[in-house]
């Protein structure tokens, strides 16, 4: 959903502002009402439109610092399961998959309100809430708490006359010790469930194809919206861009192109990595858009690769933010083990990183023809989504939603189409360049590209125009078998 089709803008005037307006002397502090919008269905792939899922039309919140009641008005009853989580304190409500026809920023309203008034004067139990899909067949609502709370009830109530089914989440303030106990008991219950549930075999969408697989990864999704500003929502924007890019790549018969997500659902970062490895992808490109509210002049696209140490503080900031995705969805996951550290693993990883650098350089060279690049357009940091040791991976931040010019570009379908075209050309050039592989596996440090590109990997104030980017002579290993199969 891009600017033009945005919920706030398509809602009748009055409703959106009414969401902020209600403040009475009683226990009602905030009441939000946001209208259904047909356009939510456009998020789903065309083929999925036929599936009639329950629809959440409105979110209504009443609260003070002791009690809170959050109500979702639904088109059909659903089963809800709820639990509490700490670090930060949260209430999680799991549901079957439903469509939320509600402004994704609806749950941020209380924060905006808090900022405007003096937070010392009054407080509330719920700090903010968010909602969205969690994965195939699942949706989730997350309530961020200002203080420990107990779930009084979280059920679907269909008894109200003329109101239709409603999901009612009622909370009451509790003490820290009770909250901690509830978190622990919920955690052990979930662990038991996980043991009982058989692990689903991972679907390797394109593992059987003989062509190189290019995996395009639209960042965020579902309950994790990513950056949001002025009605632009990162998850929707990057999804739209990724689909445009995939369409262009599919026109090239040399690749098989796969998307990590084909709708607005949440996928944990580790699953994205598993998908890339499972599909034996020859290239993984994660698409994101950044925001830097305190520096509105910072603009342009940046291509990130993975590294153990961040190239600079800004790269570290971006990686930390993008790595928050799982936490945003209320998923507690231990950082994956970094893998066995044997010589073969190290060699593979080094080779993979060299390929990633080559592609990052190629991409920046192509991109600058279509759009702005950040002052330092090639950076690296510990991005979890780029950690497949055997899949060359980059993360493209399309620009800054916090910058006026970038914002205008990203909002323009014409610009996105052009930019996606440049990325597709860069991907094609990357595979073309593998036609002259060398047998040796380069060491990461002393590797220098051969060809008409600049020598310093970290400096891409490059001179080479598109078409001249032929620097990829890193080679050897199984990638060449894959690349070779395409020609
Ligand atoms: Zn992102």
Image (cartoon, grey):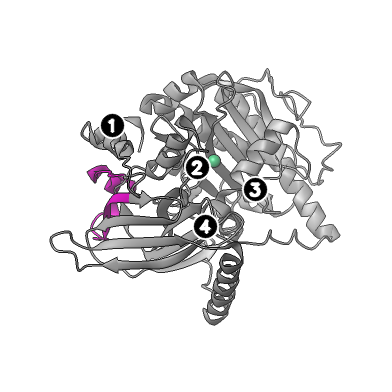
Residue 40: say if magenta: yes
Question: Is residue 145 rendered to the left or right of residue 415?
Answer: right
Q: CA distance from mark 2 to mark 4?
A: 18 Å
Q: In the image, which is nearer the foreground, mark 3 or mark 4?
A: 4
Does the beta carbon of the residue at mark 2 sit less than 8 Å from ligand 1? yes
Q: Residue at x 18, y 64 (%)?
A: 160
Question: Which of the two residues, 396 or 265, is positioned nearer the viewer here?
Answer: 265
Q: Are marks 2 and 4 in contact (CB under 8 Å)?
A: no
Instruction: Looking at the image, tell me whether mark 3 or mark 4 is earlier in sequence order.
Output: 4
The part of the image, by quadrant, that contains residue 207 is bottom right
Question: Which of the two residues, 194 or 164, is positioned nearer the viewer here?
Answer: 164
Question: Is residue 204 rendered to the left or right of residue 469?
Answer: left
Q: What is the span of residues highlighted in magenta in the rendered image?
A: 32-60
Question: Which of the two residues, 57 or 376, is positioned nearer the viewer here?
Answer: 57
Q: For mark 3, does the 10 Å Cα neighbourhood hold few (<14), some (14 to 19), or many (20 or more) residues?
A: many
Circle 2 residue: 226
Q: CA distance from mark 3 to mark 1?
A: 36 Å
Instruction: Looking at the image, tell me whether mark 3 or mark 1 is earlier in sequence order.
Output: 1
Circle 4 residue: 90
Secondary structure type for disc 1: helix
Residue 83 image offset from top left, x and y in percent? 49, 67
Q: CA distance from mark 3 to mark 2?
A: 17 Å
């Amino acid at each position: 959903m891009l600017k033009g089709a945005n919920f706030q803008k398509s809602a009748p005037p009055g409703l959106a502002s009414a969401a902020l307006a209600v403040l009475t002397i009683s226990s009602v502090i905030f009441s939000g009402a946001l209208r259904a919008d047909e356009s939510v269905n456009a998020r789903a792939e065309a083929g999925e439109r036929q599936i009639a899922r329950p629809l959440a039309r409105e979110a209504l919140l009443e609260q003070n610092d002791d009690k809170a009641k959050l109500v979702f008005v639904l088109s059909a009853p659903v089963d809800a399961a709820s639990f509490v989580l700490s670090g930060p304190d949260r209430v999680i409500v799991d549901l079957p998959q439903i469509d939320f026809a509600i402004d994704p920023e609806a749950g941020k309203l209380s924060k905006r309100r808090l900022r405007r008034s003096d937070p010392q004067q009054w407080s509330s139990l719920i700090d903010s809430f968010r909602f969205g899909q969690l994965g195939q067949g699942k949706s989730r609502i997350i309530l961020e708490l200002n203080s420990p709370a107990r779930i009084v009830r979280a059920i679907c109530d269909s008894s109200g006359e003329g109101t239709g089914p409603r999901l009612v989440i009622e909370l009451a303030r509790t003490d820290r010790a009770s909250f901690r106990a509830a978190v622990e008991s919920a955690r052990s219950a979930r662990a038991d469930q996980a043991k009982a549930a058989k692990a689903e075999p991972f679907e390797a969408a394109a593992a059987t194809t003989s062509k190189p697989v290019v995996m395009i990864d639209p960042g965020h999704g579902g309950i994790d919206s990513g950056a949001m500003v002025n009605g632009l929502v990162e998850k929707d924007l990057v999804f739209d861009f990724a689909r445009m890019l995939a369409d262009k790549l599919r026109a090239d018969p040399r690749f098989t192109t796969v998307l990590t997500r084909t709708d607005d659902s949440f996928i944990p970062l580790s699953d994205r990595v598993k998908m890339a490895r499972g599909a034996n992808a020859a290239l993984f490109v994660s698409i994101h858009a950044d925001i830097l509210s305190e520096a509105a002049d910072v603009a342009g696209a940046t291509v990130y690769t993975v590294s153990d140490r961040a190239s600079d503080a800004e790269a570290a900031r971006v990686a930390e933010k993008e790595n928050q995705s799982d936490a945003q969805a209320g998923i507690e996951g231990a950082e994956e083990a970094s893998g066995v550290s044997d010589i073969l693993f190290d060699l593979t990883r080094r080779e993979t990183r060299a390929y990633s650098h080559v592609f990052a350089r190629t991409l920046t060279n192509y991109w600058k023809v279509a759009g702005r690049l950040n002052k330092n357009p090639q950076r690296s940091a510990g991005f979890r989504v780029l950690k497949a040791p055997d899949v060359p991976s980059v993360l493209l931040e399309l620009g800054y939603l916090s910058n006026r010019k970038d914002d205008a570009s990203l909002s323009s379908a014409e610009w996105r189409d052009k930019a996606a075209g440049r990325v597709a050309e860069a991907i094609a050039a990357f595979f073309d360049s593998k036609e002259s592989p060398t047998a040796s596996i380069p060491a990461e440090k002393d590797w220098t590209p051969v060809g008409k590109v600049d020598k310093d990997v970290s400096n891409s104030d490059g001179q080479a125009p598109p078409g001249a980017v032929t620097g990829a002579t890193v080679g050897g290993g199984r990638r060449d078998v894959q690349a070779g199969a395409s020609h």
